Image (cartoon, helix red, strand yellow):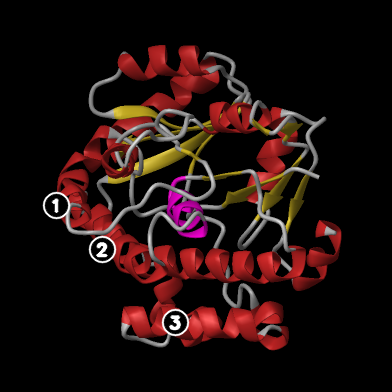
Amino acid sequence: MAHAFIFPGQGSQSVGMGSDYFQDSAIFRNAMEEASDALKYDLWDLIVNNSDDKLSQTEYTQPALLAVSVAMFRVAMDRMGDEPVVLSGHSLGEYSALVAAESLSFQDALQVVQARGRYMQQAVPAGEGAMAAVLGLDQAAIEEICSGVDGVVEAANINAPGQIVIAGEKAAVQSVLPLLKDAGAKRAIELPVSVPSHCSLMKPAAERLKDLLADVAVSMPSIPVIHNVTANSAASEQEIRSLLVEQLFSPVRWVECVEAIKGYSVEGNAVDRLVECGAGNVLTGLAKRIDRALPCITMNSISSLDDLS
């Protein structure tokens, strides 16, 4: 089988995620210890005990999700033996994909995403930004309606046909929701998030991230990585840096990423299965909406590794 591994982003986290892996796999435990050393705090304790509700705070959520994804990937590679033919990740998950492809070191990626989360939170004061899920309208209709209201509100995540997330200023997001419903949206509901990701409000955060990434070692991936901004792989180390910066204020083109994965082949072997590597099963659900004929399995429990053989 030709596998493509896909890595989840923020929103997939849960208290105790990966606990069965931690109990059963020394490889997973070693990765958690490595992550704690890089971050200078006990990451596994944070994941399990969630003291002060830190797991819901962006600067802690992002390294926690990345560490769990990378640790699960290492366990899977030890179990499977053969590598996937292509990788991708949703938003934050793109960093997990780049670590899996040996483009970023695990330690550097953890520190970058921790700073990324902090930059994102600081770019928009608490309570001033919002995101909302819109179901049942196409992207063109949503963008046209959003362009007609005052303030910043933009398409942020093109997750699946008829499933799009918008982001922007809280007042603008709230004002556009009834307009979307009037236009035929089945649902248009505000999401419980603290940061309006993937819209132009994130440009100040992107500038800070650009400065940080300039000093981070980046290599060409050992496995191709499909990026959110272009739905394509990058041609150079500098393009990888640029795409990670642009990703902060650009829509996640997830439907196109999955379509690109489907079209990928190595030595005549086309991708015939997606593997969601990380906490939760959000991307598995989206894959079913994008193409029911393309199988997708999740690795969110260690028993699911049996499905990889």
Q: CA distance from mark 3 to mark 1?
A: 25 Å
66 is higher (above) or lower (below) than 27: above
Q: Residues within 10 Å of mark 1 (few under 14, many from 20)?
A: few
Residue drawn at 24 percent across, 42 percent down? 202
Q: Is the residue under label 2 in contact with that under label 1 (CB below 8 Å)?
A: no
> Residue 309: percent from the left, percent from the top?
85, 59
Task: Give the labeled residue for mark 2.
Answer: 115
Q: Which numbered disc, 3 or 1, marks the residue that appears first in the sequence? A: 3
Q: CA distance from mark 1 to mark 2?
A: 11 Å
Which region shows up in magenta?
A: 91-100
Secondary structure of the residue carrying numbered label 1: helix
Task: Give the labeled residue for mark 3.
Answer: 34
> Residue 215: percent from the left, percent from the top?
17, 58
Q: CA distance from mark 2 to mark 3?
A: 18 Å
Residue 57 is left or right of residue 238, and the answer is right
Hey, which quadrant is residue 278 in on the image?
A: bottom right
Residue drawn at 61 percent across, 64 percent down? 73
Q: Which mark is residue 94?
A: none
